[in-house]
Amino acid sequence: MPIGKQPKPTSNTHPIWFCFGTRIPHLLRIPGHYDAPLPVENTLPIFVFSPYHPGMPPSLFRERLSHEFDVRRAKNGRYSLRAFAVFLGTDHSTLSQILRGRRRVPDSHIHDWSKKLKIDGEEVAYYTAAESVPDSEATRRQEYVRHWTAEVQTTFTQSVHWKILALSRTPQFRADCRWIGEQTGTTVDEVNLAFSRLLRLGLIEVKAKDRWVDLTGLSQLSESAFRKLALERIRQKANYFHEVPEPS
Amino acid sequence: MTNPVLQFQILSKSPDETASFYTSLFGWTIDANNPLGYRKIDTGSSQGIQGGIWPAPPQAPNFVQLFMGVIDLNAAVQKAEGLGAKTIIPPTTLPEGDEMAVMLDPQGMSFALWRRANL
């Protein structure tokens, strides 16, 4: 059976804000988006995000409803949204919010309303499936959360990061990842990953073949001081790469 | 001036397994005897470019990166940023004297700008 008229794609924007959270009730946010205390020692910050409206993904079924309503209005100029809501068995406010993209269409509504609108079962299955597929914006948000959460978690749980910095301050330091691996009890790959991360965060610089310079600016390099600084840099990087819009 | 592609880099979550696969498949040789322990790939051919293997961050997929040769690294970074790229690793000297910057192009693909020490 042919699928019904394809709705026009919507070009919703999805303003969102992101914040870091910890397992304990300390919330952190990207500067400029939220102000909250830094996480206490030994807590792992994770990213959470909260969509603020309008943030609903495009919905094909919503477009289909809208099309049905337009058809009815074309036949009868006095046909109201309230009448359409009564026909579907819902209230005017709910339908209005759905059509304006302020509410998701629950699966049960898709089935019930499709029956009333005599929408073919195959088409209903299509709409139901489409509702569960994340749109590209949702995928981007998930990727953002996944990436920066992992960045924070790795930096916090793998002490090799600050050990590299601590070693670089010592006179016996050797700019050799194999040597650093021996000193820190880690593999060369783990050292290299940490080294890359420190470079990305602007916390280390290679000055010469045999000289790495700690750029933290910390007079006393403790693990907790390093974590605080690293977290701040990660926030800055997250902002730089994603240019998260300000909540309005 | 030209900006040739000088090197490819495979970023792998399992660098040893990746190295083993490609050496078995193509007969490439790998030498990690350098200060970074960087697995340099020698394809054994004068055609094409040589490469390397670097560990991929845990949150990243396995991917391949191209290294483009430049004469003035800072100028190249500035130009790329002017065209919409973002800098992942700012211009950095590597332990063997090469200079490198890693960037994201406007479509989100990473690439490296590289100035060889002997240029």
Image: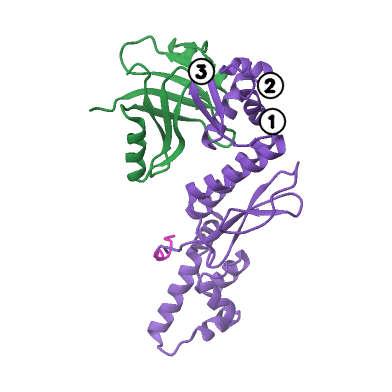
Residue B96 to residue A38: above or below: above
Residue at point 44% right, 15% down?
B41
| Secondary structure of residue under mark 1 | loop
Answer yes or no: are tags 3 and 2 on the same subunit.
no
Instruction: Identify the disc placed on residue A159.
Output: 1
Check contact, mark 1 vs mark 3: CB within 8 A.
no
Instruction: Identify the disc placed on residue B38.
Output: 3
List x then y, in percent, for residue A60.
48, 63
List x then y, in percent, for residue B15.
55, 21
Query: Which tag is nearer the camera, tag 1 or tag 3?
Result: 1
Residue A224 to residue B73: above or below: below
Answer yes or no: are tags 1 and 2 on the same subunit.
yes
Q: Chain of mark 2?
A: A
Residue B65 in view in this figure = yes
The image quadrant that residue A103 belongs to is bottom right
Instruction: Identify the disc placed on residue A184.
Output: 2
Which residue is farthest left?
A: B1
Q: Colour of chain B?
A: green
Residue interval drawn in magenta: A1-8
Residue at point 48% right, 86% down?
A80
Q: Which three-letter amino acid code belongs to the residue tagged 3?
A: Tyr
Badge 2, how many Cα within 10 Å: few under 14, some, many 20+? some
* CA–CA distance in space, label 3 to label 2: 18 Å
| Color style of the picture | by chain
